[in-house]
Amino acid sequence: MKSLVAMTYYQLMHSIALALTFDEKPNLYFSMDFLNPDEVLLERIAGTGVFNEVRGITWRGEFPELVKELRKTYNAPEEVIDELGSSLFDKYLEPQYEEDFENADKSDEIFIYNDFQYHYYYICNHFENIVGVEDGYGSLQQQIGIHRFKGDKERLEPFIEKGYYPEPLYRHEKVRKIISSTDFEDLDEYYRSKLVVWDYKDIVAQNEEEFKKALLYIFDVENMGITGNSSLYLGQPLDRSRYCNAVDNYLLCRKIIRNENIDGLNVYYKPHPAERNDPRVYGSEKAKVLPKDFPVEVFNYQDQKFDRLVTFGSTGASIATCAKDSRVYFTQTEFTRKDVTNAIKEEIADEKLAINMFIKAKEMTPETYINVYSCIFRKAYVRTSLYLLIPQGSLEEYREYFDRAHLHDRVKEYKDQISGTREEKLWHKELGWIKTWLDRYDPYIEFCEVASYDDWTIYREVMSGRKDYDYAMLLDEGNPGFALTNEIAGSLRARIHPVIFFRLQTTITNANNKPVKIALNPGYLGDNYNGDIINKVWHREVLRRFEEEGELTRENLGRLTADYVGYIRKREDFTLNVTADRFFEIEDGKSYFGELAQQIINETEEVTEEVTEEINGRLANVVYDYYDWLVVNGKSPFTLFASDVVEDLIEDKDYQFEVYKIFADAMLKDRAVSNSRGLIQDINFYQGMKPLIDKAAEKGLLTRMENVQRVKDKIRIKRRIRRMYRRIFNNSGNDKNNNK
């Protein structure tokens, strides 16, 4: 009995066509590493009756222990690689895939469409007759030319060179033949000796009706609402494949959609299953986003015809028959990775990511002036437009005060104002940057008079009327823009989100009401949403949908946001933190929460260790609520220090230190379990936490001082490394002089 191992939808289609040509039904193993298909899809594939057995195989959570061990081999010498040999793979891969392939006939042929995944190790060890299959698009030569391992799999390369892990690209000795849809003139002798040309269309044609029936049983494309005068746009995961970053891919898609709209066509955007950007950002009246969990080739077997098929360079265009015409932007048949990157850059050369920053400018002060101009992006691919929201009847006065001609005077005034404070160090580099940058960059600034500074009033009067942008953000005047814009730019280059949040508002407590995890730091991109429109980065498509909702309420926006964020983090629950509603009713937060804190202290009659722990935990929760109240009422989370908030609310020094201890301990514990931080991140984190840590450490109240010591040790190590490099450099220079 033959076996097939596929990992994408088009490979599944090829597997179905191939299986229908066999005398005996084969087993299908669907690798879940790439698409992570659910059980429903696997059941529908099995329901076609094409396969003897359908089974999902997976490396379950990326084999975290294997990945951890592989990371330790970075730049390891040859003797270390030889000592490890194949032991890591035998330990972690063999047991997993022995279970996955338990029903496979290891003596018969196994057809594999991809040899870059971990299951290839097991297959090469246990199957004697391997058949490599390219995907049906004649892309074998491209795979050979552009393949490279990415991420943690780069650590496999020394093991491959030493023969402890099978060589990719079908170069293992057990690969008997390679099926391709196309012959190639320039293949080397190894591939030419094993190549079997069997065109995908010819394979399908042998059992076309059965093939069509199976496809339409698995994927329902009949009810997608396709209308006439339309263009089918095939997306590609160009950023995930490292041809470009996420912003470049977004700008390319946006331009292609607009080009189709200019030609009078409604676009149906079919995302690639591996798309990293959220495709729903492209949704509009003239661009409908189709589901991504089906192969676009299914359209070939239904009656609807598109007027045009458009793509940057998807191989799917070569076998598509569902459109009357086609437009392909990248048409090279032989290319390098650099060719693709250059083509993308050339196509989007004039494109910019447009971000509208709506800033509440309640007062004319040097601090507000500096905060406004620091919101300008220092990125070539971004166009920032600043909208200053000012009180009605004050246009000329504000226009004069915020004139760029006063920049040097305002910077001097602000420097004098913050001299000797914590902000002086915070702003040192940025104030210098603002003066030099604005000499070269003229930002668009518009003054908008508003009836009130209520977020929803601002949205109705100003934000909702502007359409020509990608992202919009409503900001308090207290936001230091340099920190904010760096977070935004960095996040969007990694992935295009419909919504970006900057702080996880959560408190997890134990049975004694002691917080065990408290996140007070900005920079979090996630799915815990406090219901506010302010201080979030909104894609225009979300706001357009929001307008369609009708009534402007926190709950409506929360539900809409949950829908979008759930797409990105589909396995995590979305939380709408409605405690912000009651915060709006509190006029004097310091008095309100201060009284709550004092009540907790006064309620104590008998002081025991257990009672003290509970009191400290309850006080920490009150302080955290006060922190939230400050943010909800306009205080920027970027300028709030936990130690300052504690001191502002609690007068008793002993209780202050106890709350410092809880906050610092929880945050250090969170850092200690992270596997992703490096030396520089540790140093930056320690420096940012230092005021809080020092206050707790003065009284010996920090229970995880070993973590602090570890960070301090790393700082000393870094200094020693710098000194070592200086010595090497100086000695190298002396040696050169001595050799002359």
Image (cartoon, helix red, strand yellow):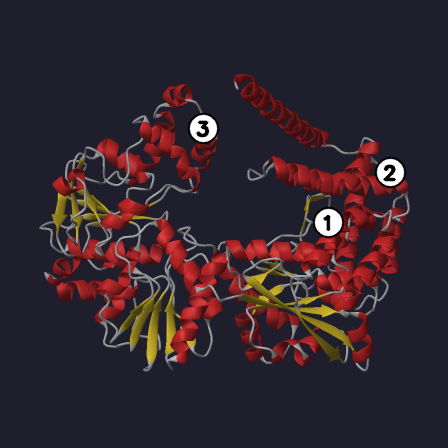
Q: Do the residues labelled 2 and 1 touch (CB within 8 Å)?
A: no
Mark 1 or mark 3: whose residue is earlier in sequence? 3
Mark 3 or mark 2: whose residue is earlier in sequence? 3
SS for tag 2? loop
- Give the mark toward the camera: 1 or 3: 1
* Residue sitting at x 27%, y 45%: 144
The number of numbered badges drawn on the structure is: 3
The residue wearing badge 3 is 73
* Residue placed furthest toward the top: 738
The amino acid type, in three-letter code, at marker 1 is: Lys
The relative height of residue 643 versus residue 461 in the rendered view (above or below) is above
Q: Describe residue 208's horizontal placement relative to residue 545 as left or right.
A: left
Rendered image quadrant of residue 672: top right
Rendered image quadrant of residue 126: top left
Q: Please provide percent x and percent y for residue 141.
A: 24, 48
Q: Are marks 3 and 2 in contact (CB under 8 Å)?
A: no
The residue wearing badge 2 is 607
SS for tag 3? loop
Q: Compare residues 420 and 295 and report the one nearer the observer.
A: 420
The relative height of residue 263 versus residue 86 in the rendered view (above or below) is below
The amino acid type, in three-letter code, at marker 2 is: Val
Q: Please provide percent x and percent y for residue 515.
A: 71, 45
Q: Distance between the residues labelled 2 and 1?
A: 49 Å
The crowd level at tag 1 (other Cα within 10 Å; few <14, some 14-19, many 20+) is few
Q: Please provide percent x and percent y for residue 600.
A: 85, 49
* Residue sitting at x 59%, y 20%: 734
The residue wearing badge 1 is 429
The amino acid type, in three-letter code, at marker 3 is: Thr
Q: Distance between the residues labelled 3 and 2?
A: 53 Å
